[in-house]
Structures are given as structure tokens and as C-alpha cells.
Amino acid sequence: MDKEATEQPLTETTEASESAPTPVGPVAPAKVTIEADEPLTGGVLTGEAAEREMRRHTRRSFLWAGAALLGVPAGWKWFNDHAPEDGTSIKQVFRRTLQFNETVARTVFFSPTHRAREFPREKAVEPRNNYKGETPEIDLDSWRLHLSGTAEGDRVLTMGDLETLPRSEQTTELKCVEGWSAVVNWSGIPLVEFLKKYPVPVGVEYVSMRSEPEGYEDEWYYVGLDMPGCLHPQSLLATHMNGEPLTAAHGAPLRLVMPHKYGIKQIKLITHIAYEKERSRDYWAEQGYDWYAGL
């Protein structure tokens, strides 16, 4: 830097010092105390004024919080009373959310060639008896499967009829919406083989299954199933679990196994199967759950 340029400010400082003394060191700002009922912008409150302001803000925050808490039940009551329903006592906004989830499950996660994970046979355990109420005990010799909506008309099938169909075995995970799961070994009739044996008419997109054991009307149950899910190679009409015939607790003599869906779809003690063109009724969907229930 030019030497002359560095010397010039010294002259100005000297001239300025003749009229006023130059402070030495930092100068502490003067303390401002405001005694007022209301705060002033930029001021510092002390003493009683600060305490009054703190109390005022505390009261205001408490009132806003109280109003918000009171508004939650009031808003929920209004929603319950006035939000439109979908015809099954479920709010439309909830049903639309479930339908969005179904679209994602269908298009992103499900594939007719994607198989659920299979486990070694020795990993299999006995799952819970998860009947929603009393476990039905029936005479297995008198059990019949009522089939309707086929291309060849309605049928009444016996276990002997089903035993003529091809069989398969798998060890897969049964998952419940309640949060528990169990690895189980199943064997029985691939559902796709059943659909081949008893042909599905053109235009049918859904399969309905019902459990209606006589004398257990309070336990009657029904599920609606999409056709792609039924045609999946791991969808099974199971007759055996862990190498033994099904017991009453697990749906004897015939139950559905679909490892790509939650357990609420895997109906036990099937008594009726129907092919349908419209979306079939579903017990838990009518209680507010997802109709598709895919994993």
C-alpha cells in the first residue's frame, strides 16, 4: 500500500482531537428502564413491569391452548355428524384413503409372478386361533361347498370332489393386521386349479367366499376377493396345516391361504364360493378396514 495514503488519516485524527477528547476503550451503553403497563418496541422491561408482561403472555397462551383443546372434540363431533358416508357407515374421506392405498398395493407391490417369501419347513409353528368369536365345531362328514356363478351353473361339492384336484404345499408367513405373524406350513388345492376345474364366466372380476356353519350364525363371515389375487400361484384352498388335517380352530375342513394379503382375508371353514361381476361384500371392509388388504 502507498505510504502517503497511510499517513493522511493521522492528520485528520489530530485535527479532530483538538475539538473533543477521544474515548479510550469500549463505551457501555446507557441502561434503559421502562416502567409501563404495555411493552414498547425495543425497550427492556424490568421489575414489576416485566412480571406483569410475563403473566399476560402466560394467560394468553393458556387461553389459546384451552381453546384449541376444546375445539378438537367439537370438530370431531361435527365431522361425525355431518361428514358424508359411503353407504356402509364409513366416512367417504376415510374410504378414499383406503382406495388410494389399494391402488398403490395393486400397481406397485402386487405381481402375478412375485411370490411371497417361503421358509424352511422346520420354521413352521401353530398360529393363533383368531376366530372373531366362538370356534365352530361341525360334522365334517356332512360339510358341503356351495359353488355358484360358474359357466356350468351352480354346484354342491364334497371333499371327495376336491381331492381329485392337483395339490401343492408351501411354508409362508401368515400376517395379521393386529401386528402378529406366524410361519405356517400349508398344503391343499391351488385356487387357480379350482378356478380351472370350475370355469369362471367372461366378465367375472371378483370371487366371494362365505363361512356359514349351521348353528353358528353369530360367527358367519364373508370376504370379497379380486380375481388377480385368486389367480396368484400361492393362493391356496388349504386342507392341511403343518402336515396334519385342519382342526376346527384353524378352519376345518377348508380355508383360504393368501400370503400376499392380511389374515382378515384368509377365511376359515369355507361353505360358499361365488363368482361375481361386481365387487363382493367383505366383513371387515364394512367395519372400516381396507377391502383389498394387500401386503
Image: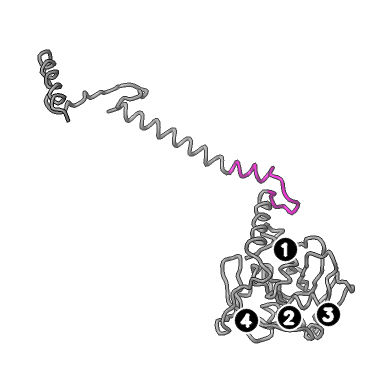
Mark 1, residue position: 283
Residue 189, label in figure:
2
Reading the chain from its start, which is encountered first: label 2 or label 1? Answer: 2
Segment tinted magenta in the rendering: 73-92
- Amino acid type indicated by mark 2: Ile
In this rendering, position of residue 280 left or right of residue 263: right
Q: Residue furthest front?
A: 2
Q: Nearer the viewer, residue 85 or 2?
A: 2
Within-10-Å neighbours for mark 2: few <14, some 14–19, many 20+ = many
Which of label 3 and label 1 is nearer to you?
3
Within-10-Å neighbours for mark 4: few <14, some 14–19, many 20+ = many
Coordinates of residue 95 in the picture (x, y in percent): 68, 53
Distance between mark 4 and mark 3 Cα atoms: 25 Å
Figure check: 285 above or below 10: below
Mark 3, residue position: 157
In this rendering, position of residue 89 left or right of residue 53: right
Reading the chain from its start, which is encountered first: label 4 or label 3? Answer: 3
Quadrant housing residue 57: top left
Secondary element under disc 2, as helix, strand or loop, is strand
- Amino acid type indicated by mark 4: Asn
Reading the chain from its start, which is encountered first: label 3 or label 1? Answer: 3
Q: Quadrant of the C terminus?
A: bottom right
Q: Nearer the viewer, residue 32 or 220?
A: 32
Residue 185, label in figure:
4
Distance between mark 3 and mark 1 Cα atoms: 24 Å
- Amino acid type indicated by mark 1: Tyr
In this rendering, position of residue 53 left or right of residue 135: left
Secondary element under disc 3, as helix, strand or loop, is strand
Q: Quadrant of the N terminus?
A: top left
Reading the chain from its start, which is encountered first: label 3 or label 2? Answer: 3
